[in-house]
Image: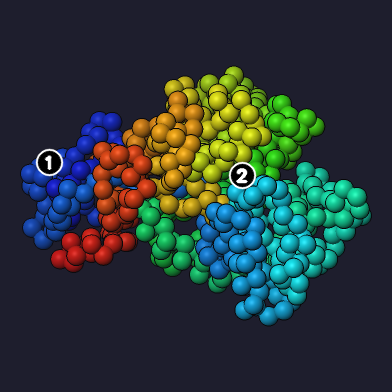
Amino acid sequence: MQANLVLFNGDIHTMDAAAPRAQAIAISGNKVLATGSDGEMGALLAPEGKALDLKGRTVTPGFTDSHLHFLSYGLSLLQIVLLEVPSLEEVLARVAARAEITPAGQWLTGHGWDHTLWEGGEFPTRQDLDRIAPEHPVWLRRKCGHVGWANTRALRLAGITAETPDPPAGAIDREPDTGEPTGILKETAMDLVADLFDDPSLDEATSAIKVAIANSHKLGLTGVHTMEGAAAFRAFQRLEADGELGIRVLMQIPEDNLDAAIQVGLRSGFGNERLRIGGLKAFADGALGARTAYMLKAYEGEPDNYGIAVSGSDHLNELVGRAARAGIASYVHAIGDRANREVLDAVELSRNAGEGLDLRHRIEHAQILHPDDIPRLAKLGVIASMQPIHAMQDMLVADKIWGARCANGAYAWHSLLDTGAVLTFGSDSPVEDLNVMKGIHAAVTRRRADGSPGPEGWYPHERLSVDEAVYAYTAGAAYASGEEEIKGTLSPGKLADLVVLSQDIFGIEPMAILDTEVAATMLDGEFVYTSQDFREVTEAL
């Protein structure tokens, strides 16, 4: 077999332990033919083939974001974006600006606000929004996705009053003197407003995903593991049928759809190289910023607050076991240490019963673990699906509300690796930035872009090497989806998905990783994105 394309004069990090570095890579069709020296790979080039000079650029396998909400990301580009806005006043200014160009009575929606960045760090209220948008219903999701902020008009449309009871596994924040809702809704209470919105139409969802794919290619992404429902799945299927699904998608099964999936015989791994089924997506608890992550001990300064158990232990045990017996892995959201323990207990119970022993269960987030539970992930074969960028956004509030517990269990990437656990990394976009370089930087430095909290980073014993971080976005992600035989490393016979970077992230000063851009992204042996500089190199092709 001969190569139709050879990329030479590069610094190629294959993530394959058998041949970790190469100067050139030979590609035949949509597969890697071989890696090696320029001369070796040049000898494999077919007479009509093309050769491309990388001019020393660094190459890695294509990146996979192992936890995000891809359709939501595409749709969020049309909403009011409030990520990293440093003050309540600026948030209100952005909402007011949108209100000025939106007809009265129409919804204003947005996402990404984070009250812990604001002076005082208190939750906002409906009255804040009423002042600047009294003629519009307003609904703004916090960055974690576990808290929503509504104005009075939105609350009235949802029928939420002082007499409205808290729904199971949810909370309506109330004014202490009157019991009136403050405008802050937590966990399942958000559904009271969210249920007022229709799912996007198939055309709307398809268009949003196309935009999301184009943006993803610019960031080096060739795969995503998305945590969404039927609206997204229908759109992905349409794009795949039309030959327009330009990214590899692992689709999860929401808990509400589990019985239907079991009835039709759907199993983890069903699908093809572009679209396949991953596992059941369930929730054990809430989130850190919302103070609803389920904890073994109370929050600092809140002796009665242990968080919210979205799924109790009995329900988790039944759920994981039922899915496993049907051949479906469980991907369970767990942030607090008690929630993580209960997920591990459920998996252990299922494993001991001999249910689906080959399934690759995952904990999504695993933001704080009790030290006794860290070795259990490797022992039980549970994958840690984590988002490094969360740690840098959350470190101050984590120290404030979890205290000393953070030192030996918060975002414990290195500790987990030391026990033999598999890490797979993502962004949780649109909760956080989709940019993979920001995730790698966070994993390697445990510092924010401004250098805080200092040169050593936040609990530096949990820092990773660049190799370890990139592995979690490539080979680790492929293992997590059960696709390590076909992708994740630049090995002979695997899919030719790769990323060309603007600088050597393996050799530069770690803080400079943030300045790295994607020069080109290849999917199935074809460039799906090239930067202006790299485009000049590829014009001959």
Front residue (pair 389, 226): 389
Quadrant of the image for the C terminus? Answer: bottom left
Q: Could you tell me which residue is drawn at 34 percent across and 45 percent down?
A: 513
Name the secondary structure under disc 1. Answer: loop
**Quarter location, residue 489:** top left
> Is 328 situated above or below 434?
above
Q: Residues within 10 Å of mark 2 (few under 14, many from 20)?
A: many
Q: How is the image coloured?
A: rainbow
For disc 2, the marked residue is 281
Residue 58: percent from the left, percent from the top?
24, 46
For disc 1, the marked residue is 37
Name the secondary structure under disc 2. Answer: strand
> Is 21 situated above or below 341?
below
Q: Earlier in the sequence, mark 2 or mark 1?
A: 1
Residue 496: percent from the left, percent from the top?
29, 50
Q: Could you tell me which residue is drawn at 78 percent across and 30 percent down?
A: 303
Mark 2 and mark 1: Cα distance apart in space: 44 Å
Residue 363: percent from the left, percent from the top?
57, 36
Q: Is residue 196 left or right of residue 230?
A: right
Residue 452: percent from the left, percent from the top?
47, 39
Q: Amino acid at mark 1?
A: Ser
Front residue (pair 72, 291): 291
- Count of numbered circles in the view: 2
Disc 2 + disc 1, Cβ < 8 Å: no
Q: Is residue 353 left or right of residue 250?
A: right
Q: Could you tell me which residue is drawn at 74 percent across and 32 percent down?
A: 301
List the single residue furthest toward the top: 372
